[in-house]
């Protein structure tokens, strides 16, 4: 946020998103609530801000009109919260014997991941802003090899697998409990759908064929007059923050809605994978009889395996990185979030913890699950069991997809 002008930090760049300064204050308020108050037993540092920064009480559409802190005050608030949070940490019992919030450092990791999730949300806002509001820093980029050759699809054998968090690190409540799922054999794309492939759909008139779309999808396309992915231009270019570049056919298509992904899959004679199919393809090691935390194993993400952590400020060509699953599927973490066919709901035996508003209030509606993370996702959040979700018409997410079909 440092290079962004003060007026642009305060501005509502899209009704879908918060002012950037609201996000900054919210990060601090969340840290104060969960670490200082709930875990540490302290009184609120600024009780008058509780409602301002409560995401459930103040929906995004109205956050530009509430008295959120401006830059200097927000930074001071954040610093004060951090100082007292660290004092609480000095005396907190984060061993396995600690109380439920502190044991294994649960609430501390939760707050770190919450901040990291907002890092990506703020980049979505900056991408939606007018060109020139934000100029990405000169990044060293991610060094990649030429895309690896391989089959278009990978067959995933049928049978049982363990779905959800296996208890080998932090996980949100919606990733739990781990449970057995039984799936029929299926095929899944080895890599995400590329710009080139999606361009063929556009050129073939996919946006003008109602038979390819669900009723809700076609109504959305007609209402919004959508003709191409969000940041594509009519003359074959793509906007990324402050610059327009030629659309690269080797990159994963991004900033498409669930409706667009669903229509493309139908055009291609396929379908979107279910959430369970996606997770089995990403995680299941049949030889070991267990799920992996990451597609390649238990080692944390590294740049040669996954394009994460805002290092490249964009995707890399599909199939250019290592990090294959046991069956040879590539790029399941990083580059772009991937839409799945599944609605967002709780697993069997779900129990909200530590608060309903993170997951449970979004169950059972129109929200669709996304998996895998993007180039803007921080590594702490990237794991096979992590579940993202949004409404099927949303396109501000750094989201693409891959297709599947019955074996």
Image (cartoon, grey):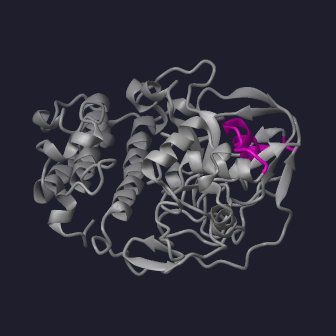
Q: Is residue 12 magenta?
A: no
Depth check: 51 or 344 in front? 344
Residue located at (55% from left, 61% from top): 254
What is the quadrant of the N terminus in the image? Answer: bottom left
Up the image or down, 198 lies above or below 281; here it is below
Q: Position of residue 280 (x, y in %)?
A: 75, 41
What is the quadrant of the C terminus in the image? Answer: top right
Residue located at (52% from left, 59% from top): 227
Say whether residue 391 is left or right of residue 47: right
Q: Is residue 283 magenta?
A: yes
Up the image or down, 173 lies above or below 6; here it is above
Depth check: 352 or 287 in front? 352
Say whether residue 11 is left or right of residue 310: left
* Camera sees residue 126: yes
Say whether residue 146 is left or right of residue 27: right
Numbered label tally: 0
Say whether residue 329 is left or right of residue 110: right
Residue located at (86% from left, 63% from top): 151
Depth check: 156 or 59 in front? 59
Residue located at (41% from left, 78% from top): 243
Q: Position of residue 257 (x, y in %)?
A: 53, 49
Q: Position of residue 386 (x, y in %)?
A: 57, 42
Report which quarter residue 84 is drawn in. top left
What is the magenta range? Answer: 269-288
* Camera sees residue 393: no
């Amino acid at each position: 946020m440092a290079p962004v002008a003060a007026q642009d930090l305060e501005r509502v760049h899209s009704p879908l998103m918060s002012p950037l300064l609201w996000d900054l204050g919210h990060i601090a308020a969340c840290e104060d609530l969960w670490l200082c108050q709930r875990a540490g037993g302290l009184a609120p540092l600024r009780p008058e801000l509780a409602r301002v920064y409560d995401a459930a009480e103040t929906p995004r559409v109205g956050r530009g009109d509430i008295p959120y802190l401006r830059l200097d005050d927000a930074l001071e608030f954040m610093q004060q919260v951090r100082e007292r949070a660290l004092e609480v940490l000095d005396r907190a019992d984060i061993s396995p014997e600690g109380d439920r919030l502190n044991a294994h450092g649960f609430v501390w990791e939760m707050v770190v991941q919450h901040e990291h999730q907002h890092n990506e949300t703020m980049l979505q806002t900056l991408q939606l802003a007018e060109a020139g509001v934000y100029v990405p820093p000169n990044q060293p980029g991610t060094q990649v090899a030429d895309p690896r050759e391989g089959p278009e699809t990978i067959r995933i054998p049928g049978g049982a697998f363990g779905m959800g968090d296996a208890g080998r690190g932090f996980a949100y409540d919606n990733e739990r409990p781990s449970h057995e799922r039984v799936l029929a054999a299926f095929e899944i794309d080895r890599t995400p759908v590329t710009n080139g492939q999606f361009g063929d759909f556009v050129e073939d008139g996919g946006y003008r064929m109602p038979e390819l779309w669900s009723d809700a999808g076609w109504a959305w396309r007609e209402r919004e007059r959508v003709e191409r992915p969000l940041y594509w231009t009519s003359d074959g270019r793509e906007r990324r923050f402050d610059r327009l570049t030629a659309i690269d056919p080797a990159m994963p298509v991004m900033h498409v809605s669930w409706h667009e992904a669903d229509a493309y899959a139908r055009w291609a004679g396929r379908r979107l994978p279910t959430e369970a199919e996606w997770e089995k393809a990403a995680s299941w090691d049949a030889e070991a009889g267990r799920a992996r935390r990451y597609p390649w194993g238990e080692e944390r993400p590294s740049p040669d395996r996954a394009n994460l952590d805002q290092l490249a400020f964009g995707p890399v060509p599909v199939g250019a990185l290592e990090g294959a699953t046991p069956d040879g599927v590539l790029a399941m973490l990083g580059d772009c979030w991937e839409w799945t066919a599944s609605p967002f709901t709780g697993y069997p035996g779900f129990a909200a913890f530590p608060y309903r508003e993170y997951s449970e209030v979004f169950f059972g509606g129109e929200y669709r699950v996304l998996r895998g993370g993007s180039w803007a996702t921080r590594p702490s959040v990237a794991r096979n069991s992590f579940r993202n979700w949004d409404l099927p018409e949303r396109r501000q997410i750094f989201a693409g997809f891959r297709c599947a079909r019955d074996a």
